[in-house]
Amino acid sequence: MTKRIIEKVGFAEVFLLLTAIGYVILGIFDFALLKNALSVLTRLIVQIAPVLLIVFLVMFFTHLLFEGQKIVRFLGKKSSLRGWSVAIAGGIVSSGPIYMWYPLLSDLKEKGMADSLIAAFLYNRAVKIPLLPMMGHYFGWNFTLALSIFMILFSVANGVIVQCLTQRGAEG
């Protein structure tokens, strides 16, 4: 029966309804805790909203500016060094919480972005330009430079492995 309800109404709506019921029950038994929970939820939404807005704006402009075929040619499975460069540079300069980038990457994947480039993008989020001076100060510039170069190189290796595994998974 639950499965039929979820199929008819949708999982998101059922989840929202159950969450609202949970808040009502919490309010009945402990109103102070409900106020605290709603306060934390409001602060979280205020924190997340600007980054989420930026990601949705990037998605919007991606839809406007790039046709599906252009993205496939530029970031698709047969992309060249330029596609790898864009994925690596994009990962390095990206900021904000990682989960905020998932909708944009999912949108690009639907348009044909290769799994290898998505993996390289996500891997390179660990290389942060603003933190390099501090890392150089604490660990030395030789270590910082070597680590950054190895992370970029291993992001490519990681991307190739992910591409092989996802192709194999799609075949079998």
Image (spheres, grey):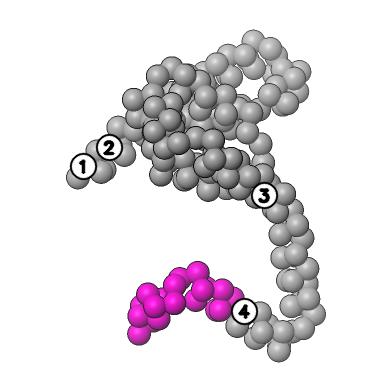
Disc 4 marks which residue? 20
Mark 1: secondary structure: helix
Alpha carbons under labels 1 and 2: distance apart? 6 Å
* Residue 104 locus on image (x, y percent): 53, 43
Residue at figure coordinates x 43%, y 30% from the top left: 70
Does label 4 or label 1 sit earlier along the sequence?
4
Disc 1 marks which residue? 171
Mark 2: secondary structure: helix
Does label 2 or label 4 sit earlier along the sequence?
4
Disc 3 marks which residue? 53
The quadrant the N terminus occupies is bottom left
CB within 8 Å, label 4 to label 1: no
Mark 4: secondary structure: helix
Is residue 160 found left or right of 91 in the rendered image? left
Residue at figure coordinates x 55%, y 16% from the top left: 149
Residue 10: in magenta span:
yes
The quadrant the C terminus occupies is top left
Does label 3 or label 2 sit earlier along the sequence?
3
* Residue 164 locus on image (x, y percent): 30, 32
